[in-house]
Structures are given as structure tokens and as C-alpha cells.
Amino acid sequence: DFHFETQPIPNALSPLFHALPHGVHAAGVLFNHLAELLLPLCLLGPRKLRALAGLGMIVFQLILIFSGNLSFLNWLTIVPLLASFDDEQLRASVEIRPTARLHQRVTIALAVVIGALSIAPVLNMLSPRQAMNAGFDPLMLVNSYGAFGSVGRERPELILEGAMAEDGPWEAYELPYKPGDLQRRPGVVSPLQPRLDWQLWFAAMSQIEREPWLVYLVVELLEGNDEVQRLFAHVPFDPPKFVRILRYRYRFAPSSSDAYWVRDRVELYLRPVSREMLRALRR
């Protein structure tokens, strides 16, 4: 009931998915578990079962693509799933040349290597002290990467603001894709990943003491760094005298509203700072 609203960068269809009844969301969770836990095992079965499993997992990835901007994750997942279909099943849509014997040998060798390297990640998955986002070989060929450990029920957002005086007036720096302006419709950026928009989603769930890179970002805005300013869709000052960061709680606006978002101010995330203040801290 919360994922479509709280995911890193919602797209234009995310509000529609969010507004679906609870029963549809619950069925989606069931399909999620089916696609990620059961269907992969079916890839080891007969050709028809293998093709149905591949089709089911591709449909799952397409739903995620249509419902949000999860960068390249879903697109990359679809690529190996194409191997679920043999030449005969694909021949109707694409031209398939006979599989070379060398190709078969390379595929078998790769499967053996990946299978052997995957023993450690599988044991890690079964361990009560499971390590997430860990690598298990020097080349990082296998890992326990997980995009998200949980789904948040609320959407905190960080809004950077600039001003020419410490008491304002304050104007917001708008990023191209993450929520900011309440009137701006969520856009489509997948399979690209706007790094700053993405990282600010994580930072909003943390504190400034744990996000030192944000302080460096503020410094660059105060210095008027052109490369940093190009990351933003709207730069109100070039440069500002002061920068601050506010934390808000965002929610999708009702369908009857002219806006796409509603928000409540939560707290001052970073108090107003100037170049002079930062220089004094350096000394």
C-alpha cells in the first residue's frame, strides 16, 4: 500500500498504481514472491515450464518499469531472462541462427563457474546473520545485492533552499526528477539513474551527520560551481549568500487536486550556512 508513493523516484503512472485497492496491492505482493522465489526454480524444468517462468518474471519486471523509475535494475534483469526461451520459441519474432558448439561449451563453462561461486551467497542467504550488499569473490561476480531492505510507510524529502539574507526570502533548488514543486508531474527517467535525485532519497531517511557529502554539495552551491548547478532543473541564485535544507513529508495529492503532491514540513535538516561560516569552521 506504500511502495508506489515512497519509492525513490515515482513516475507519472505511480499515483495510479498507488490508488489501486488494497486487494490489488496484496495480490501484487503475492506475485512478487512468486516471481522472485518460485519461478526462478522453474527455469531448471522442462522447456514449456521454463518459458512460462521466464515470461512471468519478465511481466513482473515490466510492471515495475511502468510503475516507477527504478533506473536500470529492471531492464538488466530482463536481459538474462531472455535465455528462458529456446530458438524455436523465439523464431517467430526474431531470426535465430543455429547454436554453435563453441557457444554451447562457453555457456556450460560459465554456468559451472557461476554455480560454484554462488555457493557462498546461498549459504549467506540461509544464515541468521545474513550480510546484505556483500561481495563473495575478488571480482565481485556474485553478491548479495538487494535494492531495498524494506518499504517505508512515509516519504521524507529534502528540499535545498537558497537566500541572499539569513532571514530570507528563501527559494528552492529544484531537481529534475525527484519530488519538489507540488505542481510538477512526476516524470519518466528509467533506465537512466539521476544520481543526485536518487541519493537525496536515501539522505532524507538519515541525518546530516551521516551524510557528509551533502555538506560538500552545499559548499559547491555557495561557491556557484557550474558543474554542480547543472544537476538542478532550477537554480534560484548564482550563487546564494545562504543555503539551508528542510525536511518535508510528501504524499500523493488526491485525484481531485490540481497538484500532484501535498507536503508537511517536518524539521530544519541543516540550518542556514554561508561561505563565511564554513570558512570559519575550516580554520
Image: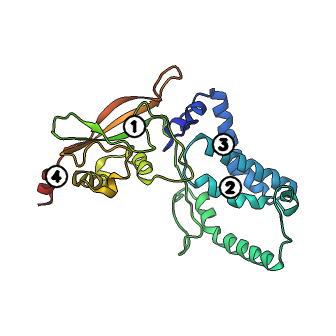
**Residue pointed to by mark 3:** 63
For label 3, count other residues whose C-alpha is less than 10 Å away and answer few (under 14), some (14-19) or many (20+).
some
- Tell me the quarter of the picture where residue 212 sits: bottom left
Q: Which residue is mark 1?
A: 180
Q: Which mark sits nearer the N-terminus, 3 or 4? A: 3
Q: State whether residue 247 is above or below residue 109.
A: above
The residue labelled by disc 4 is: 275
The tag earlier along the polypeptide, 4 or 2, is 2
Q: Element type at marker 1?
A: loop
> Callout 4: few (<14), some (14-19), or many (20+) C-alpha neighbours within 10 Å?
some
Q: How much space separates mark 1 and mark 2, taking CA atoms?
A: 31 Å
Residues at marks 1 and 3 touching, judged by CB atoms closer than 8 Å = no
Which numbered disc, 1 or 2, marks the residue that appears first in the sequence? 2
- What number is the disc on residue 17? none
Disc 4 vs disc 1: Cβ atoms closer than 8 Å?
A: no
Q: Earlier in the sequence, mark 4 or mark 1?
A: 1
- Amino acid type at circle 1 is Gly
Instruction: Reply above or below: 116 against 251.
Output: below
Compared across the picture, whether 223 is left or right of 123 comes to left
